[in-house]
Image: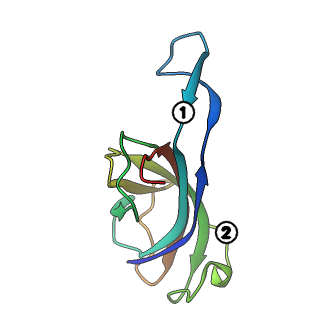
Amino acid sequence: MTLEYLTLRNYASRTNDYQDDNANSITNNTVYKQRDCWGWGQKQGIAATTMSETVTLPITYDAVPVPIAAHLGFKTSAAASIGGITSLGAYTSGAHTPTTTNFVAVLCDRDDDTNFNTSYYYAYSWLTRGTYDAV
């Protein structure tokens, strides 16, 4: 597992439109202290159609943040940086079971339900946004 945290961004005061679950309405959510964290990771393929790893966040949010994960591609050796990912893969990525300190990045193969190639490293990017009072 390789993780790299790219940046933290603070918002001192901000008003957001927020939809909770599938309620068909948007509410105004005033967030006084908000922080985005983002980064990327890679995982060597395993002989399965789904694999996952826990992403530990560089901060502890005040409440569970909203995580987003997306696939970046793959490489035949571990990439030294996000710019080293050279091939686009037929897989998807998502974020699962978020907490204030981590979430699980899930990678699923979409290529005819075949297993991941154990010789490749599959990369994903991620973003979390949530409240953080220690700004």
Amino acid marked by disc 2: Leu
Q: Residue at x 48, y 71 (%)?
A: 41
Relative to 96, 12 lies left or right: right
Q: In the image, 86: left or right of 36?
A: right
Q: Is residue 35 left or right of residue 51?
A: right
Q: How is the image coloured?
A: rainbow
Residue 111 makes an appearance in the image: no
Q: Residue at x 41, y 74 (%)?
A: 45
- Structural distance between the alpha carbons of marks 1 and 2: 37 Å
Name the one closer to the observer, 94 or 60.
60
6 is higher (above) or lower (below) than 125:
below
Vertical side of 74 occupied by 125: above or below: above
Residue 31 numbered tag: 1
Residue type, numbered disc 1:
Val
Q: Is residue 63 above or below residue 114?
A: above
The x and y percentages for residue 63 are 36, 39
Q: Is residue 58 left or right of residue 68?
A: left
Instruction: Count the labels in the image.
Output: 2
Where is the N terminus found, in terms of image quarters?
A: bottom left
Question: Which residue, as the protein is rendered here, is positioned at the far top?
Answer: 24
Is label 1 in a helix, a strand or a loop?
strand
Picture disc at residue 88: 2
Q: Residue at x 33, y 70 (%)?
A: 47
Q: Nearer the viewer, residue 72 or 54?
A: 54
Q: Which mark is residue 14?
A: none
Q: Residues within 10 Å of mark 1 (few under 14, many from 20)?
A: some
Q: Are marks 1 and 2 in contact (CB under 8 Å)?
A: no
Residue 10 at x, y percent in the picture: 59, 54
Residue 90, given in percent of the width and then of the height, sits at 60, 60
From the viewer's side, name the closer residue of 49 and 85: 85
Q: Secondary structure at mark 2?
A: loop
Q: Of callouts 1 and 2, which one flags the residue occurring earlier in the amino acid sequence?
A: 1
